[in-house]
Amino acid sequence: MAPPNIPAAKRAGLPVDLDRLTAEGDDWLSPEDRYALKTHGVCTQAQPGVFMIRVRTDGGRLGSDRARGLADLAERHGRGWVHLTTRQQVELHHVRAEEVTAVLDGLAGLGLSTRSACGHTVRGVMSCPDAGVSLDEPFDCGPDAAAVSAWLLSRAAELNVALPSRLNISFGGCPACRDHAKLNDAGFVSVLGPGGEPGYELLLGGSLGKSVPALARTAVAFLPRADVLPAVDALVSLFVAEGDHDRPGKARLKFLVARMGWERFAAAFSAELAAARRRPHSQPAPVTTPLSASLIEVLGRSPAGGWGIGVRPQRLAGRALVTVNVPLGDLDGEDLRALADLADAAGDEHLHLTRNQNVVLRHVAVEAVAGVSEHLAALGLGLEGADSAMDVRACTGGPVCALAITPAPAAGAALLRSKALARNAGLRVHVSGCPNACAQHQVADIGFSGGKVTVRGESVLGYQVWLGGDLGADAIGSVAGRIAAPDLPAITAAVIGVWEALRERGETLAATVARLGLDAFRAHIDAVFAGRWEQGPEPEDDPLPGPAAALARAS
C-alpha cells in the first residue's frame, strides 16, 4: 500500500468512520484513513485485518482496577497479550478491525484514552516512576506531567491537524531521567531553585529516529512550576508557526532547531513563553519536597537480603520501591492481573510503568518484599536483573509492526541467554526492528537496528551494530558494522569480550570505545567474524555517526 499523504489528511480534518470499520472491516481504508486512525491510537499491523491499539497512561501510572480491565480487554480482543512500551504506554495487539470500537469503548469505560497515542501528535507524557518517593527525585513531578497531558488532550482535535510532527515530552529529576530528557522534544528535569523552590530545567529539541539523531539542549535553566503549562503552550505555538508542514519526514522539532540555529530558536521560544504567560492557565497542584526521614533512618531499615537494583529504598523509612523485571515488556492477562493484585496487597494500588518496559511497585513494606519476590517467581517474573544488562530492550518488531523489518523480540530473547551479558550487569543493549529507533539503539552501549544488510556481497536480513552511545557523556553511538540476524548473540559476546580485555577500572563500554577508537573494535570483530560481517553502515542507508550528529546538534 502506498504511504499516506499526511499533509492532505490533516487538511481534510482527519475524519474517521469507526462505525464503517466495525461493520465492514478495514479493506476499504485508504492510506489517509489509516493515518487518521493513528490519531485515535489505532495503528495498522503487518498482518491484514488487525490493529495495534496504544493506550495512554497517566505518566506511567496505572491503577490496579484499570490494569485488570486492560487484562480483560486483551483476553477478549487481543490474544491476551499486553505490551509495555519504552514510553510508559500499554499496547494491545491483534485486535480485529471489527472489534476496534469495542476496545475503544471498553477503555473509555475504564477512564483510559488512546487519543493522540500514535501519529504526528503529542504522544503520552512521561513521568519518573520514582517521583516523590525515591532518594534521587527532588519532588513529585507527577502532578505537572498529568496537568500537561490533560491540557494537551483537551486540545487533541485541534493539535492533531495543526502540528507538523509529534512531540515527545518527559518529566523527571533522577540521574536516569536527566539523561533521558535529552531524547525528548521537551524534557522537564526536576530541580530545586533558589530557596528550595521546586521547578525544572527545560531541555528542547531532542530526538533519535532514522536520520540526524540529536540531543536536547537547555533552553531554560530554571522554570518555576507555574510556568510549565505556559512553556508547553509556547512550544506548541512556535512549532505550529515555524515547523515544516509539507515534509513529514523532516518535520520533527530537531529539524526546526537546525534550520533556525540554536540561538535564534531559543530567542523565539523565549518570546513565545513571555506571550504564553499572559494567557490563562491553571495553577500547579501543591507538592512536597523534604525527606520524610533521615538517610540514616531510611537505610537502617532494609528488607531481607538488603537493598539491590530491584529493591530500592524510599524516602520513608521501612518502605521500598520494587522493580518487577518484565522480559521485553510482554505480559499476558493473568500476569497483569497478578501484578494488580500485588499492588493492592503490598503497594499503593497502582502499577508504575518504566521506560525500560518494567513495572515498579511503590510503598512496599520492607517486611513484605520477600513475599512479593516469591509471588513474582511463581509467575516467571522477578526482581533480579531489573533495569540491568539482562533486561534487554526491544521494540515489538516484525512480524507485528507494519514498519519493522526484523523480529526484534526474538533477537532480544536470544540475548537474554547471553553469558557475556550475565557477567556485566548494567550494560544497555537495545534492539530495534528497523532504523526508526523505537528501542533507542543509538544511545545503548550496544545497539542493533534491523533491516536488509549486505554482508560479503549478499543481501540478508540482519542488523547494523551501534557502539559508543552514552547519554551521560552526550554521545550518540556510531555504526561499527553489519551482521546477519543469526550472528547477533555471537557478535554481542565478541564486543563485550574485547571491552572486558581492554577496559580500565570503572570504564564504561562507551568510554572504552571513545578511548581506543571504533576502528580498534572493528579490527577485533574482523578477527573473530572473518567473512561473517561487514564494516561500516549499509551504503544506501548511511546512518549518521556520532561525530556528525554532534555537529548537527551544534548547528
Image: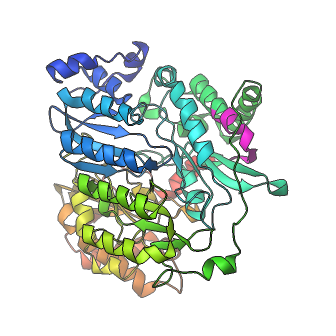
Furthest-top residue in this view = 12
Task: Tell me residue 96's x, y (percent).
Answer: 18, 33
Task: Tell me residue 177's x, y (percent).
Answer: 56, 58
Q: Which residues are magenta?
A: 219-232
Q: Picture quarter containing residue 498? A: bottom left
Q: Picture quarter containing residue 49? A: top left
Task: Tell me residue 157's x, y (percent).
Answer: 47, 21
Looking at the image, residue 27 lies above or below residue 447: above
Check the picture and name the quadrant holding the N terminus.
top left
Check the picture and name the quadrant holding the C terminus.
top right
Position of residue 196 in the picture relative to residue 346 (left or right): right
Q: Residue at x 34, y 21 (%)?
A: 5
Query: Is residue 228 on the magenta stretch?
Result: yes
Q: Is residue 484 visible?
A: no
Position of residue 480 in the picture relative to residue 217 (left or right): left
Looking at the image, residue 241 lies above or below residue 496: above
Query: Is residue 532 on the magenta stretch?
Result: no
Furthest-front residue in this view = 345
Position of residue 50 in the picture relative to residue 151 (left or right): left
Q: Residue at x 34, y 76 (%)?
A: 421
Q: Residue at x 46, y 84 (%)?
A: 304
Position of residue 526 in the picture relative to residue 166 (left or right): left
Looking at the image, residue 446 lies above or below residue 170: below
- Give the camera-side residue of 10 and 405: 10
Looking at the image, residue 261 lies above or below residue 11: below
Disc count in the image? 0
Question: What color scheme is it?
Answer: rainbow
Q: Is residue 466 visible?
A: yes
Q: Residue at x 58, y 43 (%)?
A: 145
Task: Tell me residue 19's x, y (percent).
Answer: 24, 17
